[in-house]
Amino acid sequence: MDNYSELINLMRPAMLIPLFPLLGFLIIAFFGKSLKHFSGWIACLSILASFFCSLYLFINLSSNQKLDFTVFEWIRWGDINLSFGLLVDPLTIVMLLVITGIGFLIHVYSIGYMHTDEGFSRFFSYLNLFIFFMLILVMGNSYLIMFIGWEGVGLCSYLLIGFWFKNQAFNNAAKKAFIMNRIGDLGFLIGMFFMLHYFGGLDYNLVFSAAQSHPKGSTLLVTITLLLFIGAMGKSAQIPLYTWLPDAMAGPTPVSALIHAATMVTAGIYMICRSGVLFALAPQTLEVVLIVGVATSLFAAIIGLKQNDIKKVLAYSTVSQLGLMFVALGLGAFSSGMFHVVTHAFFKALLFLGAGSVIHAMGGEQDIRNMGGLKKYIKITYITFIIGTLAISGIFPFAGFFSKDEILAASFAEYKLVWILMSFSSMLTAFYMFRLYFLTFSNNFRGTQDQQHHLHESPATMTIPLIVLAFLSVIGGLLGLPVVMSHTHLFSQYLEPVFEVSKNIIGAQHNLAHRTEWVLMGVATLAAIASVFVAYNLYISKKILPEPDADVKGFTKWVANKFYVDEFYNKVFVRPVMVMSDIFFVLIDKLFIDLFVNAVAWIVGFTGRTMRLVQTGNTRFYIFAMVIGIIILLYCQLVHPFLNVYFN
């Protein structure tokens, strides 16, 4: 009874977690102009309050407990009951801490970054709304509630990417993100309809128990999981629905950090982990997830080699890292994928915010060819950025090393070819990240005199989040030390109750001999160091600079132009749709709908003009018309019986 009452008491802070950002959004949306720059601190405090509530749940809710309760009944017909309910278990708490913790740091950073922007209050209202929907996404106890948050973050990403809406290119990027996400969302929605029809509801408990009554690998389960994976591909930017993510750099840099690090792009990973039972019962789908993850990780890493926009390099690194997470999911290593989600949130938020600090110092410049030598001017940004670079490159003992090592070890245990390809992708990551670092911070300054005069370190509101994230990027690996270093893997042990059923269904253990694991870690470290050495030799020793866009030729030109995927999509999909829209506009809108509407309007107008002629205001004419009308009525009454006799 005491345990039950404790769980009841924990419901209150659980419900407050999404309410605080929603309240912050409403206050700023309605009173933002009056509050001015206080709106930024209100937004920060609302996220901080949610973080403390999440921390309270983490402390008081053990890993083998969970909260699963209905807030209110929503839709009921027949045997189907769709309610608005919340679920808080270890997987939810991990996401809550990441979303609110990293989100709070990004909010604080935004106060300094957006200080002079005329849309300051509007920006923070969007941020709070974004966090609210992300919290709903991870806290829902059914696919319906998840889908509400899923669509909500899609809407907010549109608002934030196109925040500077006076620039048409930014508007186009926002529309691109919105539309490509809708493509994936359609798959998710159809998958929900399948679950509703065959399982009788959308609650996780109901769906998972019903799914286990079907044989492993059944057509129904494979169909549902493939449809869910299409949704994940759109939200988490996997081939072929990845092109929106690099263009999302059009938004302010804090938006890039929020979308790429802690929230939106991890939604697809979370959805598959939450649906672990379904995917474990569909091994064919897991193979598809694995193949898509490998392809995306490699493809994006290759493109990142020749990008010169500091944010575009980080964007393609995000796509590549997401591919690595999907590889973990495809191998059935759900806790390893989530571990990389957490460490990636630390160092990728650090790198994006560090890039924002560089852009702030450079007066808006984003081309790394026009930078160089910045470590003398922005030392805090320089130190924290190198920590993030070491972490994402998988250098021991930074956070990225441990989470990458887990995934590489799992791939080596299952598919040696996948291990080779992912090791190569990790080498490419280390190379292009240190290319970015060397071209930005080392050698001599290559910008203009005005830019050099403007160079200065960012304010404390921007540097303090960088320092905190750098600290987390250093110690984050302690959450998941490998077996050869520690008998207790804190992270996977905490999530074990969530993934216990799916692990039993899959049956894969991914256990390696200690000697083999030491060798794999050594190979991964040497490969990363070799990539760093190659980058150092090219960009420090030889001081090679990226060639101008006009001079790029051959395969390098294909890489620099992102293999012309966007151009291909425009020709194959966008232009035909636009042509079809023009045809429909002429044939349907103009010749049918407009003609019909205009005809109705003309008839009404003609009738009105005609009837107006009899409204003369002359009393004698009205009396005359009444007499004529009575005569006609009497005539019809007299003639009517004869007509009936005649026709019958």
Image: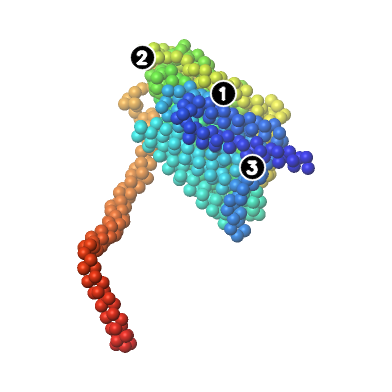
Taking the image as shown, residue 443 lies to the left or right of residue 514, namely left
How many marks overall? Answer: 3
Q: Earlier in the sequence, mark 2 or mark 3?
A: 3
The residue type indicated by label 1 comes to: Leu
Q: Is residue 390 visible?
A: no
Residue sitting at x 32%, y 50%? 580
Badge 3 local density, few (<14 within 10 Å), some, or many (20+)? Answer: many
Q: Is residue 317 above or below residue 6?
A: above
Mark drawn on residue 339: none
Taking the image as shown, residue 476 lies to the left or right of residue 351, namely right
Among the 4 quarters of the image, the one containing residue 508: top right
Mark 2 element type: helix
Residue 279 location in percent, x, y? 60, 46
Q: Tell me the distance, in whole angstroms, between the alpha carbons under discs 3 and 1.
A: 28 Å
Residue at image mark 1: 469
Q: Is residue 81 visible?
A: yes
Residue at image mark 3: 87
Q: Earlier in the sequence, mark 3 or mark 1?
A: 3
Asked if the residue at tag 1 contacts the one at tag 3, i.e. Cβ–Cβ closer than 8 Å, the answer is: no
Q: What residue occupies the far right of the structure in this picture?
A: 1
The residue type indicated by label 2 comes to: Asp
Q: Tell me the distance, in whole angstroms, between the alpha carbons under discs 2 and 3.
A: 54 Å
Q: Earlier in the sequence, mark 2 or mark 1?
A: 2
Mark 1 element type: helix
Residue placed most toward the observer, 297 or 537? 297
Mark 3 element type: strand
Residue at image mark 2: 450
Residue placed most toward the observer, 90 or 276? 90
Residue 285 location in percent, x, y? 56, 46
Badge 1 local density, few (<14 within 10 Å), some, or many (20+)? Answer: many
Q: Quadrant of the N terminus?
A: top right
